Image: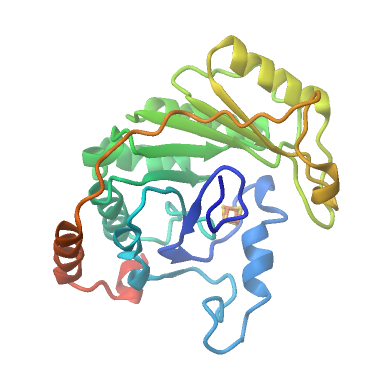
Amino acid sequence: MALNSKIEWTDTTWNPVRGCTKISPGCTHCYAETFAERFRGVSGHPYEQGFDLRLVPEKLIEPFRWRSPRMVFVNSMSDLFHASISDDYICRVVDVMDRANWHTYQVLTKRSERMAGLLRTKLRFAAERSHIWWGVSVEDRQHGLPRLAHLQDAPAEVRFLSVEPLLEDLGAINLSGVRWVIVGGESGRGARPMKEEWVVRLRDQCHREGVAFFFKQWGGVQKAKTGRILNGRSYDEIPARSQHAVPDASALVALRELFASLPNPKSSSLLR
Ligand code: SF4
């Protein structure tokens, strides 16, 4: 699956925002923070400012440069619905996704209440596009289940859950309206354990209810060794992508020019 991303369930990552702040137990060992902080102070590096939240408007145009269709994980190094990002900038990011519709976008957040509110209002134009998938993180019942409820209340064509790191037995959960569930254990130093029975319970519920199930990894300190085999096989189910024609070269240039002609957002003015 991965084209230029190591994440098993996507082809590529797109980060028109960088940096974030922690919001729940799933953030404790945030891989994005660990990665970004490694480069704090390294002059000229994209993460010279470490994990500090900032907008990267020059990245907005990137999907127009990718000619072949990709699965795109939006903001793998941030959270698009962070409270400090303005509605205007979020709308600009979603406008790109709406126009560059030959790709499939995976938008994942822990700020589900804000996402749901915007999908009902300023993002309504793109909420039910089949090529934009809206997802929430569910690491435990206390924080994850309210996010799931927000997602289910919002208009969307494809809803998905990232159950990673799975920190406890979720029990039976309400999967109505959910098309895809990704499950994974935490990895790296200090990784919190995940029990097989928790994963099996989710897999079985997904299969009973016709929900695609993707098992990403067991995790642990050495995730390459623990792998991603569950009961003797891997699970790589994923919803079908919608098919949109790739524009020809001249149409692509016109799209890029149209987008470039929009008023240039200034990073600082778009943070709330
Ligand atoms: S919301 Fe995501 S990117 Fe932000 S700190 Fe938590 S895990 Fe990291």
- Split into 4 quadrants, where in the image is the C terminus? bottom left
Q: Quadrant of residue 242?
A: top left
**Which residue is most to the bottom?**
43
| x and y percentages locating residue 152 in the rendered image | 43, 25
Q: Nearer the viewer, residue 92 or 64?
A: 64
Task: Judge from the rendering whether residue 218 lies leftward or rightward of residue 42; answer left or right.
Answer: right
Task: Judge from the rendering whether residue 251 lies leftward or rightward of residue 181; answer left or right.
Answer: left
Q: At x 56% / y 44%, what residue is drawn?
A: 1
Q: At x 65% / y 73%, what residue is drawn?
A: 37
Q: Give the colouring mode of the picture.
A: rainbow
Task: Judge from the rendering whether residue 78 lies leftward or rightward of residue 203; answer left or right.
Answer: left
Q: At x 35% / y 46%, what residue is drawn?
A: 103
Q: Nearer the viewer, residue 33 or 185?
A: 185
| x and y percentages locating residue 144 in the rendered image | 60, 34
Count of numbered badges drawn on the protein:
0
Q: At x 71% / y 30%, what residue is drawn?
A: 234
Image quarter where ligand 1 lies: bottom right
| x and y percentages locating residue 42 in the rendered image | 61, 86
**Which residue is most to the top?**
208
| x and y percentages locating residue 228 in the rendered image | 75, 37
